[in-house]
Amino acid sequence: MRGMDASGRIARGRPPGHSVGPARLPRGGEQYGTTRSRSERRGETGAVSTQKATNITWHEGHVERADREKLLGQRGVTVWLTGLSGSGKSTIAVAAEKALVERGRMAYVLDGDNVRHGLNSNLGFSPDDRTENIRRIGEVAKLFCEAGVIVFTSFISPYREDRDRVREIHGDGDFVEAYVAASVETCEGRDVKGLYAKARKGEIPEFTGISAPYEEPEKPELVLDTNAQSVEESVGELVGFLERKGYLSAR
Ligand code: ADX
């Protein structure tokens, strides 16, 4: 077995928890012209996590999550695929979605490139924009999860803090972090979209792994080592994990 549960080790490459690419700027580094941290500044931009509206009240529905899950014969879950561009996140996500739908399960993919065409079309690749990208998708994924859907998200999500925040807003067992582990060398060798070549020439600024950082997960539930294994093997491992953990049947 090459990719494995987080309790194991990755057969090749670095163990989880390391960073690749340039180090993240010190909090409040000069890029932002301020000495405050990104978390501190977040409250001011209105873009992230603070609630602007007042006089709003939570309205409960009449259908429980358990009812929806019973209807679907599964448990809602957010499977958060994180890794470099070209690591195989989207390929694995769409193949896993198909495999589950063929088994009569309700799965759905939220993909970085796709979501950036619509909901997040006003966001670029600065650290703050990436944080906001992940915050919004984390919230959307949570909604899908609570609707009983098995949702695969496919975003680089390079910052540990941002991924951890998504984990925090999910209920216990509702969030599965799957690290799609492939080295920069592997991804650059594939360069399916030709973006690494452009990034090396300086044509794409802040490109993850080249001129922007990627912080590897420290304790992912799952590591899919795509340096070493095929798409089929990764999908088999992912679906096997969901089955073993009981997500493919209602509670
Ligand atoms: S994230 O960092 O905010 O999570 P996201 O997953 O939404 O990124 O989008 C990454 C995709 O955008 C990549 O797969 C690639 O196709 C494209 N892309 C364009 N510019 C960049 C960049 N500077 N860094 C990384 N990916 C980029």
Image (cartoon, grey):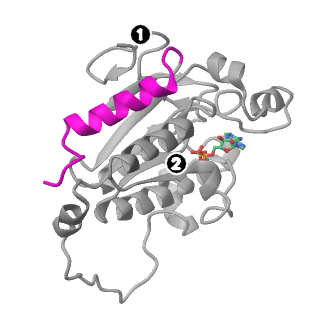
What residue is at 33 percent from the left and 46 percent from the top? 103
* Magenta-drawn stretch contains 151: no
Residue bounds of the magenta highlight: 227-251
Q: Identify the element where label 1 is drawn.
A: loop
Three-letter code, disc 2: Ser
What residue is at 75 percent from the left and 28 percent from the top? 196
Label at residue 37? 2
Residue 204 visible in the picture: yes
| Above or below for 97 versus 195 | below
Residue 4 vs residue 36, the one in the foreground: 4
What residue is at 54 percent from the left and 69 percent from the top? 46
| Residue 52, percent from left and from top | 46, 78
Question: Quick check: which quadrant has ligand 1?
Answer: top right
Q: Residues within 10 Å of mark 2 (few under 14, many from 20)?
A: few
Ligand 1 is within 8 Å of the C-beta of the residue at disc 2: no
| Residue 217, percent from left and from top | 41, 30
* Magenta-drawn stretch contains 246: yes
| Residue 178, percent from left and from top | 39, 34
Name the image quarter holding residue 237.
top left
Disc 1: which residue: 11
| Residue 48, percent from left and from top | 50, 63
Quadrant showing the C terminus? bottom left
Label at residue 119? none
Query: Which circle's residue, 2 or 1, is located before the other in the chain?
Result: 1
Residue 25 vs residue 153, the one in the foreground: 153
Residue 9 vs residue 106, the one in the foreground: 106
Ligand 1 is within 8 Å of the C-beta of the residue at disc 1: no
Residue 202 vs residue 42, the one in the foreground: 202
